[in-house]
Image (cartoon, rainbow, N blue to C red):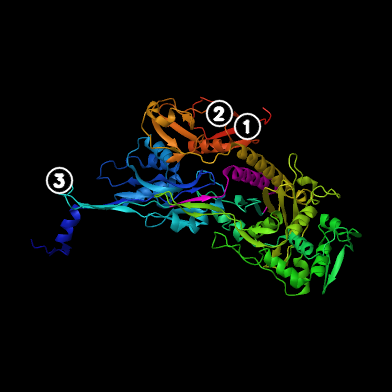
Amino acid sequence: MLFKNVDNVNLKEQASSKYDRHLVDHAERGKIKDRDGNILARDTEAYQIAVIVGQDFDNHIEDSNEVAKALSEIIDMEEKEILKVINDGIEKGLYQVEFGDKGRNVDYKEKQKIEDQELKGIIFTPTIKRSYPNGIFASHLIGYAELDEEGQIDGRVGIEKEYDKEMTGKDGFKDYNVDSWNYIVPGTMESKKSVDGMDVELTIDSNIQLYLEESLDEMEEYFEPEELFAFVADAKTGEILGAGQRPSFNPDTREGFGNSWLNMLYEYQFEPGSTFKVFTLAAAIEEGEYDPNQYYMTGQRQVMDSTIYDWEKSGWGSITYNEGLQYSSNTLMMDLMDNVGPKKMLEYYKNFGFGEPTGSEFSTEASGQIVFDNELQQKITSFGQTISTTPIQMIQGFTALLNDGMMKKPYVIKSVRDTETDEVVYRGQERNVEQVISKETAEKTMDEMNTLVGGSLNRNSSYELDDYTVTGKTGTAQIYDADAGGYLSGDYESLTSFIGYAPVEDPRVIIYYGVKRASKNKSDTWDYGVSKGFNPLMERSLKYLELKDVNRSDEIETIPVEDFTGQDVSDVDILQNDLLNQVYVGEGTTVEDYYPKHTEMLPGEVIVIQTDGEKTMPDLRGYSKRDAILIMDYLGIKSNFKGDGYVTEQTIKPGEPLGDKQKISFTLKMKDSNK
């Protein structure tokens, strides 16, 4: 048969394309999980909205105003904006109109809400989106990923970006020909199976992370600071158990992302202030240049053309080295610098890891800088000014003090797992960096540090805990203003921080907590530091870890979950036992939707099941705050919480029809541990 071009159309290609079929088997991007397998990021089904405006087509729009009103309730556009897009499309004679990014990532519940109104002209095209079920939750660490122009999900920041290659799968395909009756022509099928991306498991513990986020929320409300951070690490291994900062953002919606894009744990370079003094102390002890009972004169020192003061400018007269440590004396640190010598002291600072990246999982990790060119810079560095560090460097250095002088490398990746073979292709593990100081020096340094909270001078007693011994070092650092070429002036123009560990007798947890430039309750940063946030975070973390030790099993078997949408509740096997914590919304028996749509879940994990019939409020008494947030977010109802712990009261009563309710308040209380 002879094919030729007619009107510039290749008839052979046209005939071929008519019967060619190409189907893409989309690969799933790997999940991000916490240390216990709870999902922090995953692909979920979503929809893109379009409106058929061509009047010659079936199912075209009939009432533009009603459609615009309905869509304005689920996408981030004003009703008049939507109406303009629709009317412009009608005037231009288009077949359909879309709404750009605003019309993408519509979830099943929002889709159903529109479809229930039975408005003609609205169509939903299935797509995928990256979902973050916990909202603001280690957001800068996890990062986010989104669809690119080619319909592929790409990591933009955080772990999503750093492990984009590992988590990106490979799409499969099916190519074949059909005949004029649309039957597959034998021998034409070619196919390739998709390969899903690898799962990345973090060292983050979701419960500790929840405590951390709640603590930051309370501190943000109380101080209204410019910046705020909190990081929790395992004192023995260097694993990062929790990481958060304010401002933060919701990776599911990107709300707040423009306020701060910096991952403070790894990328934030700052002058730490007095928290740095512990490293000067450790170096002096190692060199035999610190005697806790030796006396020195406090108040001020003349260095080059500058006068350097203690924070109490008149000083405390002649006091011992240990008393100077408890007072957080700058002049003591300058004496120790003289005793050790700047050249030798610089070696210790470098050995503690300052001035270079820790070699973390983040390619964007900052190195900090040791500025040590003259005597003034050397003296000021001894108490944590002029030098710039990152929080991860401070945590890394601290691990040396708590592990017999052996510094541990902090890490946040627990494993990377091939989902096709279940093979662990990378496993994070405890790593020794360097023996920075001797075991004896580490013990002596800890002995001195143990006097810093509630010691003989009763300093920093606000950090004392009821049930645990705790100690650490406070810091009030001046903030350098690069634009002005000097430090900010004013009593509270500073970074207030505390890096501490507990229990003192067997350190398990390190917490580094900081608040920068509080704008409310400013004097409390001086009187109480960051104890309002540090204390409950430390206490709750330790109690949780103790309970986890008791309940720990070597291996937790997951529960496989297959899609059971549309089935009768009585026919779904996994709903006929108590392995999952089932929360029902609806009075019917047919499953219309469920959440979260995981392919595997852990025993006891909450699953929300929406059935047909009238939607009613479930009884959430006894549920944790985290579970209540998950359930109400799914229902699209804004939640307010009073107290800590577990739900005891809810303003929408159990069994009450939900209708169009938009808000609910919960009262929470901690469970009595003696019962």
Q: Secondary structure at mark 3?
A: loop
Residue 137 magenta: no
Q: Position of residue 200 (x, y in %)?
A: 49, 51
Residue denoted by label 3:
181
Q: Secondary structure at mark 1?
A: strand
Residue denoted by label 2:
652
Q: CA distance from mark 2 to mark 3?
A: 57 Å
Q: CA distance from mark 2 to mark 1?
A: 12 Å
Q: Position of residue 310 (x, y in %)?
A: 83, 61
Q: Nearer the viewer, residue 331 or 573?
A: 573
Q: At label 2, which amino acid type do we have?
A: Ile
Residue denoted by label 1:
667
Q: Position of residue 55 (x, y in %)?
A: 27, 45
Q: Residue at x 69, y 69 (%)?
A: 370
- What is the quadrant of residue 644 in the picture? top right
Image quarter hosting the N terminus: bottom left
Q: Which residues are magenta?
A: 198-225
